[in-house]
Image (cartoon, rainbow, N blue to C red):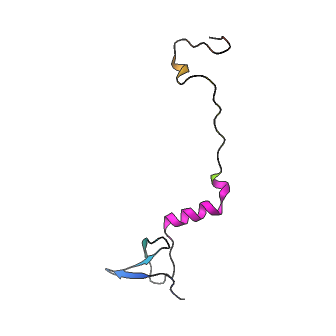
Amino acid sequence: MKQTQPDYIEKGVRYMMCNCGAYISVGESAVNVVCGTCNNKRMMTSFPELHEDKPRRKTSGRPSGWHFMNEFVDKDGTV
């Protein structure tokens, strides 16, 4: 197979460059490499349903920490 990406050998370990420019250690028979960051980016663009917006939490209209108050009077007058 034809090698498609630049590589170098340092202290007996072969490194190949990912498309983003990062070097990853590989085996002797490798012809191409993708780093973890690029792999995650590919996964997120391939499966958009995995990262759809989650439904937002509905606000109750009460102030923050209302349940820690000794007494809280709601808008409708209930205590």
Residue 24 located left or right of residue 42 = left
Write down the region rendered in magenta. 33-50
Which residue is depicted at the point 55% across and 62% down? Answer: 40
Compared across the picture, whether 77 is left or right of 9 comes to: right
Q: Which residue: 48% across, 84% down?
A: 29
**Looking at this rendering, what residue extends furthest in the bottom direction?**
1
Q: Is residue 75 left or right of residue 27?
A: right
Work out which quarter of the rendered image holds the C terminus and state it: top right
The spot of residue 65 in percent (x, y) is 52, 23
Q: Measured from the top left, where is residue 78 in percent x and y?
A: 65, 11
Asked if residue 4 is positioned above or below residue 18 in the image, the reply reads below
- Residue at the far left: name it: 11
Which residue occupies 57% across, 14% down?
Answer: 72
x and y percent of residue 45 in the render? 62, 62
Most prominent secondary structure in the magenta stretch? helix
Query: Where, by quadrant of the figure, is residue 6 drawn?
Result: bottom left
Per the image, is 12 magenta? Answer: no
Q: Which of 66 and 75 lies nearest the eye of the viewer?
A: 75
Depicted 21 relative to depicted 30: above or below: above
The N terminus: image quadrant: bottom right
Is residue 76 or residue 43 the one in the foreground?
A: 76
| Quarter occupied by residue 26 | bottom left
Where residue 56 sits: x, y (%)? 64, 39
